[in-house]
Amino acid sequence: MNVLLCRPRGFCAGVERAIETVERALAKYGPPIYVRHEIVHNKVVVQDLMAKGAVFVDDLAVVPAGSHVIFSAHGVAPQVFEQAKNFRLNAIDATCPLVTKVHVESQRFSRQGLTILLIGHHDHVEVEGVVGEAPERTIVVATAKAAEEVQVPDPDKVAVLTQTTLSVDEAMRVMSVLKRRFPKLRAPRKEDICYATTNRQLAVKSLHGKVDVWLVIGDRMSSNSNRLRELGADSGVPAYLVLGPNEIDAAWFFGMQNIGITSGASTPESSVQSVVAKLRELGASSVEEVDGIEESIEFKLPLELR
């Protein structure tokens, strides 16, 4: 068996910033540091930060007054900042700047009196945060079928936004329907789907026809990891999403020659290498890094921690 390792893979700049935000806060203020929601969608990362003193909560009401609380990379609605203020918490915002961009676009479109069609998944925490900017004006559109059926108060006053971690192809299908139905549709100045999501999907596409089975290393809660698995499966070969080597079934590789590996934008490289080690145990004879788009983007830490 041969292993083909996609590049780029793993941590994006937004995830690196979010993780470093928690680590810097722990170093500066000492544990416990509270984090609302998982800082990124990866259990390996979350468990590592818990061991260092981070406490993850879903409800700010359980956080002691005066504590430091970090908002995750996925972003939060404005009312969450208000809630933190009312509970006398010291909030640190680790929202990915590319998600913040979508929030700012929502605010701008709302001020202009537009109905906002948000392409995304209703139950994703990023979508919940963006909807919170203008809940009375925002409609979530998950599929091309939903785009065909959505109704708005004024078809001439409509704008569109996109969750940052979607399948590029699926988002384009939904966008195509919306542009046809609403010719005056207002779009962001720059595409919302983040560079890392796009680059990792392009890397998988570049190996279509060269891979017999895909392994995507990531958390099942991770939207971009799920989209990578779907993209691998779209090429007509088996594709599996695993958190690490313990979830691998040797039967998946019976008769397979080339194994493609990529990882979601919140997956640490240590998880990738542990999977590669497992594949070597199962008989993989070579591991090849497949070149892709170089990434050099970095984001500054929140002001409180610079």
Image: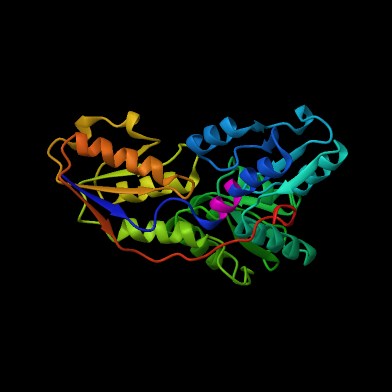
Q: What is the tally of numbered marks visible in this picture?
A: 0
Which image quarter: residue 81?
top right
Is residue 217 in sight in this rendering? no
Q: Position of residue 139 (x, y in %)?
A: 66, 51
**142 lies left or right of 264:** right
Is residue 251 in sight in this rendering? yes
Report the quarter where the C terminus lies: bottom right
Q: Position of residue 209 (x, y in %)?
A: 20, 56
What residue appears at the point 67 percent right and 38 percent down from the top-left corner?
35
Magenta region: 14-19
Report if residue 18 lies within the magenta region. yes
**126 lies left or right of 261:** right
Report if residue 22 lies within the magenta region. no
Closest to the observer, 104 or 81: 81
What residue appears at the point 76 percent right and 33 percent down from the top-left corner?
60
Report the quarter where the N terminus lies: top left
Principal SS element in the magenta part? helix
What residue appears at the point 45 percent right and 54 percent down from the top-left corner?
167
Query: Relative to 188, is 306 above or below?
Result: above
Q: Position of residue 155 (x, y in %)?
A: 67, 64
In the image, farthest residue toward the left: 255
**304 lies left or right of 234:** right
Closest to the observer, 188 or 243: 243
